[in-house]
Image: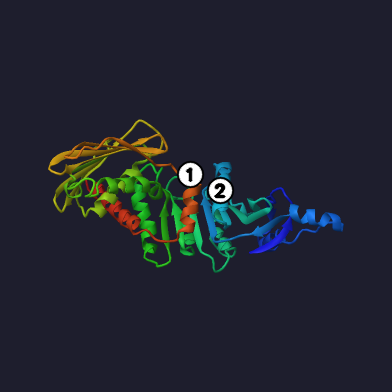
């Protein structure tokens, strides 16, 4: 870190076009101490109190890869929130393969945030734009701008697997410690699972690479609540007696439902045996569990809030059949209701805040630890997809 004196208000710098060769030199100008007019002795103490300290902070490199400028304003606000939580050098790569070959253009800017009455923490951002064949130059340009000895994460912001920028993403991933994406809004869960495995699994085995799916992270509260509700101390016999799982999800949240089923299957030791899918109908799968057969299937709701709406688990609690039902209530709560079983359990509502995408990305940057449960779920969903593909 380096520091320089600066006066309030925030010292953030707007984007400025620069030559590629002069990016580092121009960025260094941001952190030079600002010249001040002399002050007399009587005012010097007051001047010192009013000065805001400008601190350059960087804990990692964040490469943000996006297919175009759509939603630029919203993404800009998200980047602001991310670096406020986790200071990083941001390399924004914007590639439009369908456009004309317009070469490679660069902009630099800085983002500052107050962390006290007179102290600002600032981060750098470099935006690289390319069109047509120039998109192939983005990875090498980004590599030259990475700050050495700091972890590097790449975040694919697109709402679907990137057919146009696939090679670019793969090349950027190869020089990164972490790849961040979200399968939550992908319209085709089967395609999403295949892409995740085909493009990411070959590098998952690398000791230093972490795979972070924001949709998986967002489902953590439901997974924890499910594990707690099936715990033998709460629902004796439930874990070993699950016979059916039904998940209702919004139209574009199918990947989240698949991942939830995959997580249950991996944690409870279920083996996939069959799959079925009728035209225009959600799919279903059969698993063999240590204690019998399990049917898992999905339903599509008529709502469009990108989430799992309900999940019902049929099992036995004690010696009696029971259904444990989870239902999303708004954006911040999940209701849990148990029907049947030999233990009375009144309905309860649990706080389950819906974190912002920026908060999830910042958390992924802070925690560079691989999640073996996610890797196992990706493997299971790919098998679920393959089983459906074999059906006539």
Nearer the observer, 307 or 144:
307
Please state the horizontal and vertical placement of residue 191, each as a whole percent of the image. 35, 48
Which circle's residue, 2 or 1, is located before the other in the chain? 2
**Farthest residue, direction right:** 40
State which quarter of the image contains the N terminus.
Answer: bottom right
Report, in whole angstroms, how far the alpha carbon at label 2 lies from the one at label 1.
10 Å
SS at mark 1?
A: loop
Residues under numbered marks 2 and 1 in contact, where contact means CB atoms less than 8 Å apart: yes
Q: Residues within 10 Å of mark 1 (few under 14, many from 20)?
A: few
Please state the horizontal and vertical placement of residue 213, each as a whole percent of the image. 41, 52
Please state the horizontal and vertical placement of residue 212, each as a whole percent of the image. 42, 55
Q: Which residue is mark 2?
A: 81
Which numbered circle lies on residue 356?
Answer: 1
Query: Residue at the spot x=74%, y=54% of the render?
Result: 49
* Residue 102 in sight in this render: yes
Q: What is the total number of numbered labels drawn onto the structure image?
A: 2
């Amino acid at each position: 870190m380096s520091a320089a004196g600066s006066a309030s208000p925030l010292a953030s710098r707007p984007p400025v076009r620069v030559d590629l060769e002069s990016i580092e030199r121009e960025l260094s100008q941001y952190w030079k101490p600002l010249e001040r007019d002399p002050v007399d002795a009587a005012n010097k103490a007051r001047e010192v109190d009013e000065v805001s300290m400008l601190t350059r902070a960087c804990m990692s490199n964040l490469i943000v890869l996006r297919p175009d400028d759509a939603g630029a304003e919203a993404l800009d606000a998200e980047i602001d929130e991310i670096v406020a939580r986790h200071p990083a050098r941001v390399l924004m790569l914007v590639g439009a393969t369908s456009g004309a070959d317009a070469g490679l253009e660069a902009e630099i800017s800085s983002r500052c945030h107050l962390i006290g009455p007179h102290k600002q923490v600032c981060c750098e951002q470099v935006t690289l734009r390319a069109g047509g064949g120039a998109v192939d130059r983005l990875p090498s340009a980004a590599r030259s701008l990475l700050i050495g000895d700091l972890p590097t994460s790449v975040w694919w912001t697109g709402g679907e697997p990137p057919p146009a920028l696939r090679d670019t993403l793969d090349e950027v991933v190869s020089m990164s410690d972490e790849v961040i994406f979200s399968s939550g809004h992908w319209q085709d869960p089967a395609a999403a699972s295949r892409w995740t495995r085909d493009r990411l699994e070959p590098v998952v085995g690398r000791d230093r690479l972490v795979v972070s799916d924001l949709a998986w992270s967002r489902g953590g509260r439901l997974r924890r609540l499910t594990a707690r509700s099936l715990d033998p101390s709460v629902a004796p016999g439930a874990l070993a007696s699950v016979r059916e799982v039904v998940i209702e999800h919004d139209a574009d949240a199918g990947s989240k439902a698949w991942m939830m089923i995959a997580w249950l299957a991996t944690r409870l030791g279920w083996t996939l045996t069959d799959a079925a899918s009728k035209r225009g109908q959600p799919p279903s799968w059969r698993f063999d569990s240590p204690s019998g057969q399990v049917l898992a299937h999905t339903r599509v709701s008529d709502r469009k809030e990108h989430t799992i709406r309900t999940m019902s688990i049929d099992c036995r609690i004690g010696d009696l059949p029971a259904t444990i039902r989870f239902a999303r209530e708004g954006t911040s709560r999940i209701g849990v209701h148990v029907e049947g079983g030999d233990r009375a359990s009144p309905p309860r509502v649990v706080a389950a805040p819906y974190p912002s995408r920026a908060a999830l990305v910042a958390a992924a940057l802070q925690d560079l630890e691989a999640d073996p449960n996610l890797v196992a779920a990706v493997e299971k969903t790919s098998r679920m997809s393959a089983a459906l593909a074999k059906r006539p």
